[in-house]
Image (tube, rainbow, N blue to C red):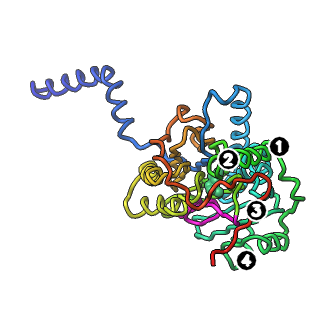
Amino acid sequence: MNASLTRRILAGIALSLSLPALPAMAQDAAAEAQPAKPARWSIAIHGGAGTMSRDAMTPEKEADYRAALDRGLAAGIAVLERGGSALDAVVAVVTTLEDDPRFNAGRGAVFTWDGTNSLDAAIMDGRTRKAGAVAGLTRTKNPVLAARAVMEKGPHVFLTGEGAEQFAREAGIEAVDPAYFYTQERWDQLQKLKGQQLTAFDVEGKFGTVGAVAVDNNGHVAAATSTGGLTGKRWGRIGDAPVIGAGTYADDRACAVSATGTGEYFIRLGVAHEICVRLRFAGESAQVAADTVMTELGEMGGDGGVIVVTPDGQAVYSFNTPGMYRGRANSEGLREVAIFREDGPGGIAPPKAAEPAAAEPAPAETKAAPKIEPVL
Ligand code: ASP
């Protein structure tokens, strides 16, 4: 063996002996450079965003909401774990939360100014970009099922009021007596709004709409959102939840989004579609796109949040309120629920002062909705 070869062998041995000293640093750097293993399936849910503070919530109530969110999450996980579709998963989550009186959707929907409940929902399949939406339902137990029936069984995308109810019955979707939607807490919120002459945006400062976004084992995404809207809403007001592109959107080429918050701002910005477009054309990550659009919404005076899932399994939140009922899970073992901003990622700068609400003056009387006279 010549001297140079001997030197190279000795150098090699020395290097390999020194390796054990390197690994901590080297492995950390390598781990950071590696993208996290893409999840096979992934899901995110929300139960509304708003002014939730720890001080205003007892530990029992907090635990109760966390358990309720986890039940919703579990319904979606069960579908995805057995290889079911993202569409079935978001429906499983939303029907579970619609049946839960804690949330402002289905059973626990808020009251309109007239003391009725008027329910809105939408669903979208990112694989086909088919969508279905319903607004102003008064008797359908699970509005998201009516939205799905519109998407799958009819020629239209968006149905409202009595016609939507009729379509739902023909599609075999269960009806209930309107009294099913009566809950004392929501009724009291309406009385507070009327008594204190608050606007529909003020009561509790807390929303409660529900939504879910998911990607399945085949990389297809879906989104669904369901809400009772805003307490004390009038004039047939419809928010963003059932408006495709505003509160709900899904596109396999980009992401799936479900929103919650002051719906008028989400409609004006086309929030859910805008986030997907930023992913497609600007190449932004889900978090950057969601934060950018939500920041813009906040600058206009809107508040609330979004959940976003991408076909490669990322699941993110973005919200500008003190809290958002939320949760996410994936095939790699992630499973979490959260309520307050400080519970984890997703909180962005709070909104600027809202624009003066010219369209919704607080009425002086407290019993019945005022008669709106036409301006001649
Ligand atoms: N976005 C819903 C609406 O404006 C309300 C909510 O999210 O709670 O109808």
* Coordinates of residue 283 in the picture (x, y in percent): 38, 58
Q: Is residue 239 magenta?
A: yes
Q: Secondary structure at mark 2?
A: loop
Secondary-structure class at tag 1:
helix
> Which badge, 4 or 2, is on the more N-terminal residue?
4
Q: Is residue 238 above or below residue 299?
A: below
Which residue is disc 2 drawn over?
208
Depth check: 142 or 302 in front?
302
Instruction: Check disc 1 and report the residue beneath it.
Output: 184
Q: Give the mark nearer the N terminus: 1 vs 2.
A: 1
* Type of amino acid at the residue the image marks with label 3: Leu
In the rendered view, would you say 67 is above or below 89?
above
| Tag 3 residue | 145
> Counting residues from the N terminus, which is met first, the one under dot 3 or under dot 4?
3
Label 3 CB-ligand 1 distance < 8 A: no
Q: Which portion, as a residue range, is magenta?
A: 235-251
Residue at the image position 87 percent from the left and 53 percent from the top = 180
In percent of the image, x 68 and y 44: which residue is there? 73
Spatial CA distance of label 3 from label 4 is 13 Å
Query: Which of the 4 quarters of the picture holds residue 134?
Result: bottom right
Does mark 2 have its CB less than 8 Å from ligand 1? yes
Horizontal and vertical percent for residue 23? 34, 25
